Image: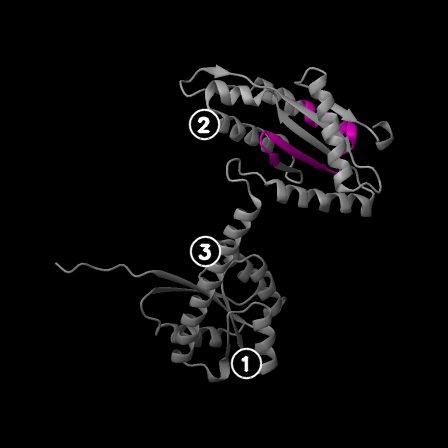
């Protein structure tokens, strides 16, 4: 009995307001081999949007002249959202239009006046390969960014990336007169955790605290590992009194969390935090230094607490 080999599915969206042109493109698409081709048609703005909203599309053939929204405008939106590769179609071979399309993110360009099955198939194959390479390059770049900026144990920003984000937040706060608060958090007696339970359990504790911190702040806030058992919490557009509510919530949440050793025995940990708010004209070094001073006070005053420093003059 002959075994049937399943061909990969290729979903192509043809966007053209002329039904005759769409029909011609569909005829040429029959020459595509090696894939089972499903052709979706759209002639109006609402039809294109509906097709894009429904999910997977592998390739878009977009006429440059579309009613309600030009092909170039559609191209810009599709490229920005990384939906699918786009091959632009036009009624005449215009080099300026071709250059503009490619500069705007199209992976291919075809004049409909000289369209043939061979040209269309060749362009589709080249465009899909170009798109695959672009996506691979994007993934490689994201992997590299992650290696450079993310702490491998906790999944948080590492010290370098955290300080970079803090510097950006300080500049924004100064430029727009926004509030900004910073908490420097340290695990109390973390050395005892490592000594008593081992470094693997210590790593588990760091990972769990990182998870709790991520869950405790807004998406617009930044949490990073400052080094060892220290973490930074950057609270954008947040004044000192509001930040104190957040950091107290963090402290109580961590205190109540159950940690476990390698044998399943449960134990608890606490954290100390130094909390400060940005002062106009202050730089990164000053802000972090004041947070460190506040953290020192928290440790001196018994740990498992938040100590705040309100203004530079109070230091």
State which mark lies toward you, 3 or 1: 3
SS for dot 2: helix
- Image location (x, y in percent) of residue 141: 52, 55
Nearest the viewer among 82 and 35 is 82
**Residue sticking out furthest to the right:** 313
Is 239 a magenta residue? yes
Q: CA distance from mark 1 to mark 2?
A: 65 Å
- Image location (x, y in percent) of residue 37: 37, 65
Quadrant in the picture for residue 309: top right
* Residue at 49% across, 53% down: 54
**CB under 8 Å between discs 3 and 1:** no
Q: Which of the numbered marks, if any, corresponds to residue 200?
A: 2
Q: Quick one: label 2, few (<14), some, or many (20+) residues within 10 Å?
A: few
- Can residue 65 be seen? no
**Residue picked out by circle 1:** 91
Q: Quick one: label 1, few (<14), some, or many (20+) residues within 10 Å?
A: some
Q: CA distance from mark 2 to mark 3?
A: 42 Å
Q: CA distance from mark 3 to mark 1?
A: 27 Å
Q: Point out the stretch of residues depicted in magenta.
A: 225-248
Q: Earlier in the sequence, mark 1 or mark 2?
A: 1
Horizontally, residue 289 falls left or right of residue 67, namely: right
């Amino acid at each position: 009995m002959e075994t049937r080999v399943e061909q990969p599915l290729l979903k192509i969206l043809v966007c053209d307001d002329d039904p005759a042109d769409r029909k011609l493109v569909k005829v040429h698409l029959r020459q595509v081999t090696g894939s089972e081709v499903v052709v979706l048609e759209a002639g109006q703005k609402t039809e294109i949007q509906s097709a894009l909203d429904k999910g997977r599309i592998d390739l878009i053939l977009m006429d440059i002249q579309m009613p309600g929204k030009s092909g170039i405008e559609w191209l810009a939106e599709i490229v920005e959202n990384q939906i699918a590769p786009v091959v632009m179609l036009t009624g005449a071979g215009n080099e300026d239009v071709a250059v503009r399309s490619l500069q705007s993110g199209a992976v291919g360009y075809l004049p409909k006046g000289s369209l043939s099955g061979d040209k269309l198939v060749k362009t589709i194959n080249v465009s899909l390969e170009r798109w695959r390479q672009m996506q691979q390059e994007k993934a490689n770049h994201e992997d590299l960014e992650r290696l450079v900026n993310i702490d491998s144990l906790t999944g948080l920003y590492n010290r370098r990336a955290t300080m970079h984000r803090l510097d950006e937040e300080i500049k924004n706060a100064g430029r727009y007169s926004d509030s900004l608060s910073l908490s420097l958090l340290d695990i109390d007696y973390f050395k005892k955790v490592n000594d008593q339970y081992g470094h693997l359990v210590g790593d588990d504790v760091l990972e769990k605290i990182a998870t709790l911190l991520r869950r405790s702040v807004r998406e617009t806030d930044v949490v990073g590992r400052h080094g060892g058992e220290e973490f930074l919490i950057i609270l954008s557009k947040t004044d000192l009194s509001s930040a104190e509510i957040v950091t107290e919530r963090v402290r109580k949440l961590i205190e109540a969390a159950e940690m476990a050793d390698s044998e399943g025995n449960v134990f608890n940990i606490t954290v100390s935090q130094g909390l400060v708010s940005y002062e106009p004209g202050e730089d990164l070094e000053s802000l972090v230094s004041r947070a460190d001073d506040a953290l020192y006070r928290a440790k001196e005053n018994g740990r498992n607490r938040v100590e705040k420093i309100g203004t530079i003059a109070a230091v």
